[in-house]
Amino acid sequence: MTIRALLNKKKRMISIITYSGLAIFLIGIVFGIQSNIFPIIGMVGFGLAFIALGYGFFGIRCPKCKGQWEYIAMGSGNPFAISKKIKFCPYCGVNLDLEISQFNTDLTMG
């Protein structure tokens, strides 16, 4: 698995959880007019989306230098993957297409 694949996996999971949370929120609000339980479900969905976005903006880091990729990861490319135009970490310069196993051996050697 490459560093890019790892970052894309994290971004994909964050996007899925965020969109699911927003869908739950909207369903809770729409059906909340008819029932007392649905506004609570809507708030749970909102909280889920809020936590996922928070992790997206503060939890995605470069595996080498631990630099925060907040706006780089979440603001580039499509909702499920970072842009292919980004080739290197802007903080340490590691190639994103480097295999993680190769990255780990380079880390222990140097």
Image (cartoon, rainbow, N blue to C red):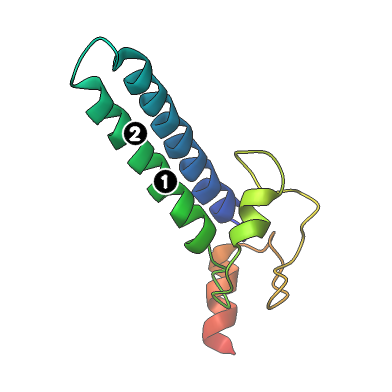
Q: Amino acid at mark 2?
A: Gly
- Quadrant location of the C terminus in the rendered image: bottom right
Is 27 above or below relative to 18? above
Within 10 Å of disc 2 (Cα), the crowding (few <14, some 14-19, many 20+) is many
Location of residue 31 by image quarter: top left
Q: Residue at x 58, y 78 (%)?
A: 65
Q: Position of residue 26 (x, y in %)?
A: 41, 23
Within 10 Å of disc 1 (Cα), the crowding (few <14, some 14-19, many 20+) is some
| Front residue of this view, candidates 92 and 99 | 92
Q: Residue at x 18, y 19 (%)?
A: 36
Is 76 above or below relative to 67? above
Q: Amino acid at mark 1?
A: Phe
Q: Position of residue 73 (x, y in %)?
A: 63, 54
Query: What residue is disc 1 on?
Result: 50
| Front residue of this view, candidates 11 and 26 | 26
Q: Position of residue 67 (x, y in %)?
A: 59, 74
Q: Residue furthest top?
A: 34
Q: Residue furthest right?
A: 85
| Between discs 2 and 1, the one toward the N terminus | 2
Q: Position of residue 93 (x, y in %)?
A: 73, 75
Mark 2 and mark 1: span between their CA atoms?
9 Å
In screen coordinates, is 41 left or right of 74? left
In screen coordinates, is 47 left or right of 8? left
Q: Residue at x 64, y 58 (%)?
A: 71
Q: Residue at x 74, y 66 (%)?
A: 88
Is 82 above or below relative to 71? above
In screen coordinates, is 48 left or right of 11? left
Query: What residue is disc 2 on?
Result: 45
